Image (spheres, rainbow, N blue to C red):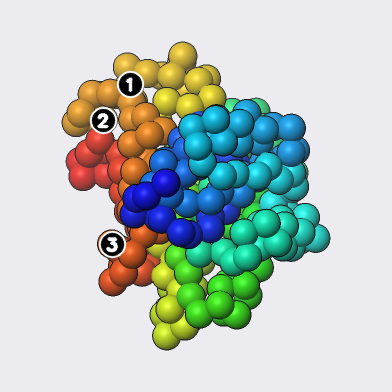
Amino acid sequence: MTGILAGKAALVTGGASGIGRATALAMAREGARVAVADRTEERAADTVAAINAAGGQAIAIGGDVANESDVAAMVARAVSAFGRLDCAFNNAGIGGGVVGPRNQRLHETSREAFDGMIAINLTGVFLCMKHEIAQMLTQGGGAIVNTASIAGLIGLATSSNYVAAKHGVVGLTKTAAMEYARDNIRVNCVNPGYIATPMTEETVRTRYDALMAKVPMKRMGTPEEIAEGVVWMCSDKASFMTGASHVIDGGYYAV
């Protein structure tokens, strides 16, 4: 396959559904060989099958991004399969309802809910970057994109743990970009607004009209719209872009 990622090897975490799946498919369409990672290898298998059926090349990897040994093995397996790691999309993440009740103010949020959110959405990004960068240093460079959120740039009431994690992702992105700029490693993050994915189904069902009142485009985004931005940031077309927060939100952040 030819495209803006032709010849590159990529790793996508959280690749079984939503933004991760859409991005893995888009990367393959643009010529990348893709290691699709999710909590289990079986969860990633459908995305891999779709890529391979379309004539691409992909493998499935299972692992917990909050577990460093799993992350190290994930990166090692991608490199073993493809010989190098040119692009990484650190996308695996969870919403508030996974670790505790939704819509709680800060004083109501349990330590377990806070720690659980940080473990996946922030520590997981740190661990992935740590091992991806170590590999990229050995091969002369690469490009990393982390999934942050508009919640990494603003406050959202009753989402303190999610907001804290996503602000942390933005900070990690900026710092890593500074530290590795001279090593030809670019690090950026994508900041999606409200996107139609399994993670947002509850929000859509209960608060759709109120949310859309704040979005100038008056609609949800699609995973494919985020994927296009991520693919571009991973490509050589974004060669002078590092440390940036790329907002794709239908105008929410502009209001």
Q: Nearer the viewer, residue 149 or 209?
A: 149
Q: Which residue is mark 3?
A: 237
Up/down of 153 relative to 143, above or below: above
Mark 3–mark 2 contact, CB under 8 Å?
no
Q: Nearer the viewer, residue 104 or 214?
A: 214
Q: Amino acid at mark 1?
A: Ala
Q: Amino acid at mark 3?
A: Lys
Q: Position of residue 116 (x, y in %)?
A: 70, 45
**Direction from residue 218 to residue 202 in the image, left or right:** right
Residue at the spot x=48%, y=59% of the render? Answer: 8
Q: Nearer the viewer, residue 62 or 214?
A: 62
Q: Identify the image quadrant of residue 71.
A: bottom right
| Label 2 element class | loop
**Direction from residue 194 to residue 124 in the image, left or right:** right
Residue at the spot x=41%, y=41% of the render? Answer: 29
Find the distance from the CA under tag 3 to the CA under tag 2: 32 Å
Mark 2–mark 1 contact, CB under 8 Å?
yes
Mark 3 burial class by Cα count in 10 Å: few <14, some 14-19, many 20+: few
- Is residue 165 visible to the viewer in this orientation of the structure? no
**Direction from residue 111 to residue 49 in the image, left or right:** left
Mark nearest the camera among 1 and 3 is 3
Q: Identify the image quadrant of residue 143.
A: bottom left
Q: Position of residue 175 (x, y in %)?
A: 47, 74
Q: Position of residue 112 (x, y in %)?
A: 74, 44
Find the distance from the CA under tag 1 to the CA under tag 3: 37 Å
Name the N-terminal-most of marks 3 and 2. Answer: 2
Task: Identify the image quadrant of the C terminus.
Answer: top left
| Label 3 element class | helix
Q: Which residue is mark 2?
A: 214
